Amino acid sequence: MHEIISTFGVDARLIVIQIINFFILMVGLWYFLYTPVLKILSERQAKIEEGVRDADAAKQARAAADAERASIVAAANEEAATTAQNARAHAEAQGADIVKNAESRAENIVADAVKKGEELAAKAQKESEAEVAKIAVLAAERILIEKQ
C-alpha cells in the first residue's frame, strides 16, 4: 500500500491538514451560515403561524360581524314592519275620522239646504200669496171700476 501512496504522491500530512481545514470550514459555516439561516427560518415560521392565527381570528370576527349584522337587519325589519303597521292603523283611524267629519258636514249642509229650501218655499208662497192678494184687489178694483 505504501507503493500506491508513493506512486500517486499522497502525503499523509496534507491529508491531515485537509481534514483539519474541512472541520474548521464546517465550524465556520455552521456558526456564520447555518445558525443564522435556521434563525431566519424559525422567525419566518413563527410569522407564518401568526398570520394563520390572525387569519383565523379575522374569519371568526367576520362571522361574528355577519351574525350581528344579520340580527341588526332582522331587528330593523321587524321595527320597520311594526312602524308600518302602526302607521297604517293610525292612517285608517284618521281616515275614518275624516270620513265621519265629512259625512257630518255633508249632513249639516244637506240639512241647511233643506231648511233654506223650505224657508225659500215659504217665503215664495207668502210672496205669491201677497201678489195673488194684490192681483185679486186689482182685479176687484177693475171690476168695480168697470161696473160703475
Image: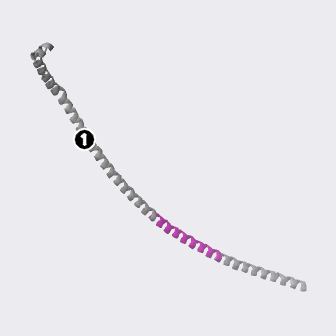
- The quarter of the displayed image where residue 1 is located: top left
- The quarter of the displayed image where residue 24 is located: top left
* Residues rendered magenta in the picture: 86-114
Residue 148 visible to an observer of this rendering: no
x, y percent for residue 72: 37, 56
Label 1 environment density (alpha carbons within 10 Å; few <14, some 14–19, many ≥20)? few
Which residue lies at the image location 25% right of the left edge and 38% below the top edge?
A: 47
From the viewer's perspective, is residue 122 above or below residue 36? below
Which residue lies at the image location 13% right of the left edge and 16% below the top edge?
A: 4
x, y percent for residue 46: 22, 38
- The quarter of the displayed image where residue 21 is located: top left
Specify the quadrant that holds the C terminus.
bottom right
x, y percent for residue 32: 17, 26
Label 1: element kind: helix
Frontmost residue, 120 versus 77? 77
Q: Is residue 138 left or right of residue 17?
A: right
Task: Give the total number of marks visible in the rendering.
Answer: 1
From the viewer's perspective, is residue 144 above or below residue 110? below
Q: Is residue 136 left or right of residue 69?
A: right
**Residue with the mark numbered 1:** 49
Secondary structure mostly taken by the magenta-highlighted segment of the chain: helix
x, y percent for residue 71: 36, 57
From the viewer's perspective, is residue 148 above or below residue 83? below
